[in-house]
Image (cartoon, rainbow, N blue to C red):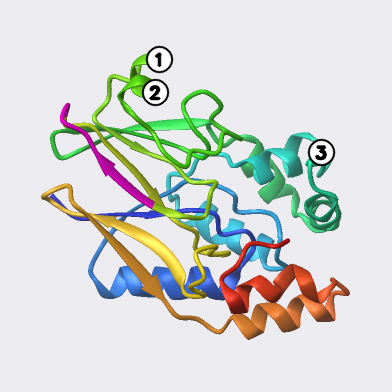
Amino acid sequence: MNDLAIISDIHGNLPALEAVLADIKSRGIKNIMCLGDLAGYYCGFNEVIDILRLNNIPTVMGNHDYALSFNFGVIERSKTCTHILKWQLDRCTPENLEYLRGLPLSIDHVFGNRQVKIVHGGLKDNLDEYLFDVDDEYFRSCNFNQDILITGHTHLLSYKSFYSGKIWLNPGSVGQPRDFNNSAAYLIIGEDFLPSFVRVPYDFYKVIHSMQENGFAPYISEGLRTGKKIS
């Protein structure tokens, strides 16, 4: 059984994605899955989508992907995200827009002898539920019968195992880490099903300069340097 790499929340950050994929390749890992949010925030979104699409990497839809492809770029709670997504919608290629519209809300996958479910948000709302913690009651209330749940959306690395044998994981974010570490984050699951969280340095100044060149306010990309959420 080969290792499985999980990436999430790339948000148009092409240099971060390229660095992470190079690191995955250097480890000989061929199995990659993505928890969505290819779009949003940064300027390299078409190139990011191209890479996932042309390499046939299994990917679920994120809330930014949904807003771009089905809601005219609008995320109601964020004027900043809406402004960026509308800019991206004007520039999104027809092939990439069609690709985003076809992404599933969840993927069920067999890894080794374990049943894995991947979603962007959570079990109650696959797109937009922020899961910062889970417990057995959450699994019961959602009729979760698989072994491993992997979620994204929070941009924070998470791992929790249960007496029942169930596991919950979040790989963090490739494109916009929010744990005060500016290195891109992703997750490897090995044969023992124990997670390895990997951090990959990359040239985030390329993204900052690209955002400035396209007229975006500095605060939008400042978090790439600090590893902090946009305030």
Please tell me whether residue 101 is drawn above or below residue 96 in the rendered image. above
Does the residue at mark 1 contact the one at mark 3 (Cβ under 8 Å)? no
Tell me the crowding category of disc 1: few under 14, some 14 to 19, or many 20 or more residues within 10 angstroms, Cα based: few
Give the amino acid type for the residue marked by disc 1 in the picture. Answer: Ser
At mark 3, the secondary structure is loop
Q: Relative to residue 25, is residue 118 drawn left or right?
A: right
Cα distance in 3D space between marks 1 and 3: 28 Å
- Which label number is shown at residue 138? 2
Q: Secondary structure at mark 1?
A: helix
Q: Please provide percent x and percent y for residue 218.
A: 80, 76
Q: Which residue is mark 1?
A: 141
Q: Where residue 168 sits in the image (x, y, percent)?
A: 32, 39
Callout 2 touching callout 1 (CB < 8 Å)? yes
Q: Which stretch appears magenta?
A: 158-164
**Between 161 and 153, the one nearer to me in the picture:** 161
Q: Quadrant of the C terminus?
A: bottom right
Q: Quadrant of residue 162?
A: top left
Question: Which amino acid, by three-letter code, is at mark 2?
Answer: Tyr
Residue 160 in magenta? yes
Q: Residue at x 52, y 55 (%)?
A: 155
Sequence order check, earlier mark of 3 and 2: 3
Residue 181, given in percent of the width and then of the height, sits at: 48, 73
Mark 2 to mark 1 CA distance (whole Å): 5 Å
From the top left corner, tell me how far across and down residue 15 is, in percent.
56, 76
Give the labeled residue for mark 3: 76
